[in-house]
Structures are given as structure tokens and as C-alpha cells.
Image (cartoon, coloured by chain):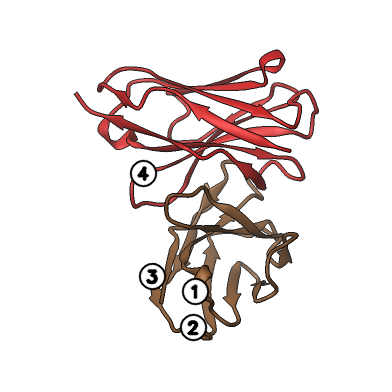
Chain colours: A red, B brown
Amino acid sequence: QVTLRESGPALVKPTQTLTLTCTFSGFSLSTSKMCVSWIRQPPGKALEWLALIDGDDDKYYSTSLKTRLTISKDTSKNQVVLTLTTMDAVDTATYYCARAFRNYGLFDYWGQGTLVTVSS
Amino acid sequence: DVQMTQSPSSLSASVGDRVTITCQASQDISNYLSWYQQKPGNAPKLLIDAASNLETGVPSRFSGSRSGTDFTFTISSLQPEDIATYYCQQYENLPFTFGGGTRVEI
């Protein structure tokens, strides 16, 4: 049974760095065809893909956010960590992690999401 | 980046109606197009991949098709449980990109 769960702060101040953790079970991120992505959704708005990391430790990032994003994994802990620097109010969103297996862009399992609000 | 233009942004229909949502890609993405359903307060759920392939367990009233860079998502007979926002997404090119979403109401 595949599950993913996001964790991290609910509130961050402007200019701070956000660190989110995705803890998963039911699959291994040691398999080269497996990957985990982060996707976010501002309140009432559309989904935005942010980053992915695969079993080979290859990483890919959103074009507009790549200078601020870092994705990493701890295979032994079954965790994927996302950091987003220089947080701003426009980064307020629900952040999801999601698994892809058949194709890197097909997200078949999602976490429930975690709402992060940026406010002083 | 590939731009995905989805329309309409919202629609209202009656139970039993046929509902159609369209998505246009800014460049050729072959069949690498998926559709997700998102109910309020929930994570998105993958319904269709490869433009027209229904995921296991998804009711057959949902379908998808492709014509060039234009993609169509159809609910043949709208049910109350289909109230949700639907998103298209291309996965032919990184970065993956989503359409703006279509809110379906009754």
C-alpha cells in the first residue's frame, strides 16, 4: 500500500527558507524508474509542478523557481526533502508530494498536502 | 515550457448532461497528456493518461481524446459525485505543466 505524507511548518515569514519533508511507504526510491515530485497549489488556483527526484538521484526543477529550489532524498528513511528559499506571500500554497512510476510525469499517488502560509 | 490552455474555467450542468472540457498544448506533446480530478479539500486523482487511457477503477463515463495538440475530456452523463475541478497536464517535456483547471458544478 503506497502512502505519502507531507510535513513542515504551517507558517513561515517572508525571506525565510521553507523546508518540507515527504515521508513515504509502499515503494522504494532506489528503483531508477521511480520518482517523487513536489507540486503546489495556491488557494483557489491551479496546480504547479515544482521539482522531482528519481531513483538515480537525478533532479529536475521548475524553470521559474529553479534558483530557489533544492530537492534531496534519504533512501534509508524513505523521505524526500524540498527546500524553497526566500519565501514570499506568493508562495503561500498547499504543497503536495506525489509518486510517479510508469512515467515521471504520471502522478499516481499523492500525499494529502500541507498548507504553508507566508506572513510576517 | 509547454503552455496548457484549458477551457472553460468553470461550467454548470445538470445531472445526466454530457460535459466536455478542452485543453490545448502550445506545442506537440504527442499523447503525453493526463487528466486529474480534484474534489474540494482533497489531492488530485489521476483519471486518464496517454490522452485516452482510463485508469483502473475509473468509471467508463469518463473519456479522453486527442486531435493534434487539442485534447478533450468528456463526462458522458454527469453524476453528483463528479462535482470537482479537473486539470489537464502534459508530461512529454520537463517541466511538467498543468492547465488552469475547470470547475464543474451542478
Q: Residues within 10 Å of mark 4 (few under 14, many from 20)?
A: some
Looking at the picture, do discs 2 and 1 lie on one chain? yes
The amino acid pointed to by label 4 is Pro
Report the residue marked by disc 3: B10
**Residue B19 on image: x %, y %:** 52, 79
Residue drawn at the location 70% of the way across and 74% of the way down: B60
Residue at mark 2 to residue at mark 1: CA–CA distance: 7 Å
Residue B16: x and y, percent?
53, 86
Asked where in the image residue B66 lies, by quadrant, the reply is bottom right
Residue B3, compared with residue B8, is above or below; it is above
Image point 75% across, 23% down: which residue?
A56
Q: Tell me the tag on residue A6.
A: none
- The residue that label 2 is drawn on is B15
**CA separation in Å, label 4 and label 1:** 26 Å
Decide if residue A112 is on the left or right side of residue A4: left
Q: Chain of mark 2?
A: B
Q: Which residue is mark 4?
A: A42
Q: Quadrant of residue B36?
A: bottom right
Q: Residue at x 54, y 76 (%)?
A: B79
Q: Chain of mark 3?
A: B
User: Which residue is denoted by mark 1 in the rendering?
Assistant: B80
User: Which residue is pictured at 42% across the width and 55% down the height?
Assistant: B40
Q: Are marks 2 and 1 in contact (CB under 8 Å)?
A: yes
Split into 4 quadrants, where in the image is the C terminus of chain B? bottom left
Q: Amino acid at mark 2?
A: Val
